[in-house]
Image (spheres, rainbow, N blue to C red):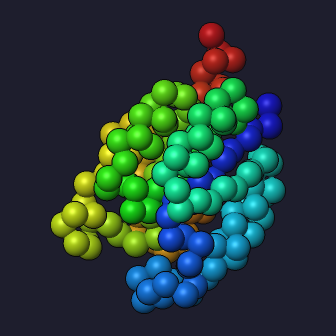
Amino acid sequence: MQFKILAIHGPNLNMLGIREPDIYGSLSLDQINQQLLAEAENLGIVLDTFQSNHEGELVDCIQQSFGKVQGILINPAAYTHTSVALRDAISAVGIPTVEVHLSNIHKREAFRHHSYIAPIAIGQICGFGKDSYLLGLRALVTHLQAQERMEYSK
């Protein structure tokens, strides 16, 4: 089976490369997406990407992915720390999800230490810049492959 993964980018990530490059790096979101798409090709998966600054659009995107994708890679950005709606949408669809962040949110301001997403995600990767996305994608694919093997062995 060829897995289909959805990479979701939250608010302000459209400003990558411009916004606080000392924290978030100098790559644009388009450059990160290009690296993700190249890695997806190497992994033999299909990857779609989506970015929005609007919580409701992100919730809609997650809900619309139900039955269409096998995994979600998400950088909820600021909504990590505030959005019960995103958490509930991910929980509702039941799609294996990996949370990623460019910066190490646990070394930053105290309000960034809490994630509403982490408790329902299969994992969280942060602090490795654009590599957080690539590591997250690989981890998600590895998880899905392991799940598939378990299902076939039954």
The N terminus lies in quadrant: top right
* Relative to 142, residue 1 above or below: above
User: Which residue does the image show at 66% across and 56% down from the upper left?
Assistant: 50
Image quadrant in which you'd find residue 121: top left
Question: How many circles with numbers are drawn on the protein?
Answer: 0
Q: Is residue 60 visible?
A: yes
Give left or right: position of 145 versus 87: right
Residue 139's spot in the image, x, y percent?
Answer: 55, 49
Between 113 and 54, the one lying in front of the other is 54
Q: Is residue 144 visible?
A: no
Residue 132's spot in the image, x, y percent?
Answer: 51, 65
Between 12 and 20, the one lying in front of the other is 12
Give left or right: position of 40 versus 102: right
Residue 54's spot in the image, x, y percent?
Answer: 52, 56
* Relative to 39, residue 56 above or below: above
The C terminus lies in quadrant: top right
Q: Residue placed farthest to the left in the image?
A: 110
User: Which residue does the image show at 35% across and 69% down from the upper left?
Assistant: 104
Between 56 and 43, the one lying in front of the other is 56
Between 31 and 1, the one lying in front of the other is 31
User: Which residue does the image show at 66% across and 35% down from the upper left?
Assistant: 64
* Relative to 19, residue 30 above or below: above
Q: Residue placed farthest to the top in the image?
A: 154
Image quadrant in which you'd find residue 86: top left
User: Which residue does the image show at 40% across and 72% down from the upper left?
Assistant: 103
Residue 36's spot in the image, x, y percent?
Answer: 69, 63
Image quadrant in which you'd find residue 22: bottom left
